[in-house]
Amino acid sequence: MTQKKLHLALFLFPGYHLGAWRLPDAIPEIDLDIDHLVHAAQLAEAAKLDAIFFEDQAAVRRSNDILAGDKYGAANPRSIHFDPTMVLPLLAAHTSRLGLAATATTTFNEPFNIARRFSTLDFISKGRAGWNLVTSFNEDEAQNYGLDAHVGHADRYGRAEEFVDVVNGLWESWDEDAITRDKQSGVYFDVDKMHFLQHQGTHFKVRGPLPMGRSPQGRPVIFQAGASEPGRALAARTADVVFTLQSTIEGGRAFRDDIRRRAQEFGRSPDSIKILVGLTPIIAETDQKARELADQMLALIPDDIALSNLKPLAGGVDFRQFDLNELVPELPESNAGKSHRDAIMAISRDKNLSVLETARYFAEGSYLKAIGSPATVADQMQAWLDADACDGFLAVPTHFPTGVEALTGLLVPELQRRGIFRTEYEGTHLRDHLGLTKY
């Protein structure tokens, strides 16, 4: 039995499975109900998960298509969600160890605001904050920020490269012991231990410093996801954790090896970056019951919703134009994200799925599917871990509460029984959970 321990985070995105929200026991209102979100975070913490993670897109999906009169499959539950950075402080107050991570785009934010926001969260949570750096692949967002069209892919990544350097520089604004609050001398902080960034680059001019001391982790944890060449380069240079859409052990191992090799080329230890594979677990007491549940949820997804769901993932390609019974053809390059476009084609070819079958696959979630009893799903996860195909998983339950409860109450105990997942937190910070160095 392996002695390695895997990392496990909960990706809570109600509606990620486009049919599960319609189950009788599902509570889709979790999308805008803070009490349910608190309960989910507490379940995750009781199971000793590394973190809870929230995606964000600053637009209703397919907004432009709807405006143009195309309402085909547009009522997508993935469109409805809070600004996650507003949710995390409340979750921090209702948990004490669980890591708290959220997405914030570098395309439509300013680095000073992001640095300040996540440093504040790190203080509020006593060292449990994580920022998921994205460059915005959803083209519908642009019109909400004064643009007629989405920013070009190369320009998004050029901005992101400079953005993260500014954020990290701002997080270094203060030495650890700079703020003294010495009542006897009347010195509140040592100005020699406060640093002006004085950054002036292509995209940003930022003086600094942040109006707060060094946060508990030094730097909040940086998460990233991206399969394109600039995405991998950015992740290898700056990320602590990388999410990936890999669907085979061979692909996962190749991706992990590539990121670790690139990290070394940037002078980093390869162990300083963790690779988490996205996983959609569908768990029941037996394999047969899990399969029946998966089939029940799949049957609740209309074909038009499934086909429509692929359009923003593939940069605006309308899959209705293809023969639905043939493999997905070569998709054109687009200005959207590259990861999903490549994954759509790979899944169709690797699994011999038609266009319609591929649409149904992604309507269940973009990630690797794990369907079965706790032992069966744990076998699949352990095989990936033993093959060095990942350092852990970003688990995306299909629905709340029973999907989350199956993850935390059925799967996690099986992983713990095998000795590949913690039974207690070893530290108080998110960096402790992930085995990362404090800055």
Image (cartoon, rainbow, N blue to C red):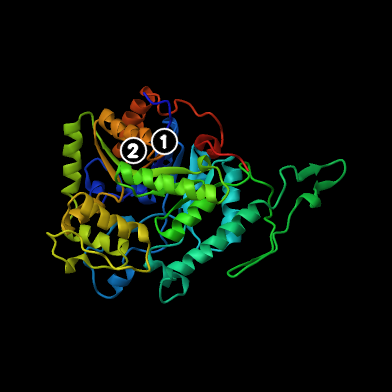
Residue nearer the viewer, 82 or 353: 353
Q: Which quadrant holds the C terminus?
A: top right
Relative to 253, residue 200 above or below: below
Q: Residues within 10 Å of mark 1 (few under 14, many from 20)?
A: many
Q: Quadrant of residue 46?
A: top left
* Residue indicated by mark 2: 404
Residue 222 visible in the picture: no
Q: Quadrant of residue 377?
A: top left
Taking the spot 23% from the left edge, 28% from the top edge, the residue there is: 285
Going by the image, does 195 lie left or right of 50? right
Taking the spot 16% from the left edge, 43% from the top edge, the residue there is: 295
Q: Quadrant of residue 63?
A: bottom left
Residue 182 visible in the picture: yes
Residue nearer the viewer, 386 or 242: 386
Going by the image, does 102 lie left or right of 178? left
Q: Position of residue 148 (x, y in %)?
A: 41, 77
What is the spatial separation of the Cα atoms under label 1 and label 2, in whole angstroms? 8 Å
Q: Which badge, 1 or 2, comes first in the chain's sequence?
A: 1
Residue nearer the viewer, 183 or 269: 269
* Residue indicated by mark 1: 44
Taking the spot 38% from the left edge, 49% from the top edge, the residue there is: 244
Q: Secondary structure at mark 1?
A: helix
Q: Amino acid at mark 1?
A: Ala
Q: Secondary structure at mark 2?
A: helix
Mark 1 vs 2: CB contact within 8 A: yes
Q: Residues within 10 Å of mark 2 (few under 14, many from 20)?
A: many
Relative to 12, residue 384 above or below: above
Relative to 369, residue 379 above or below: above
| Number of callouts | 2
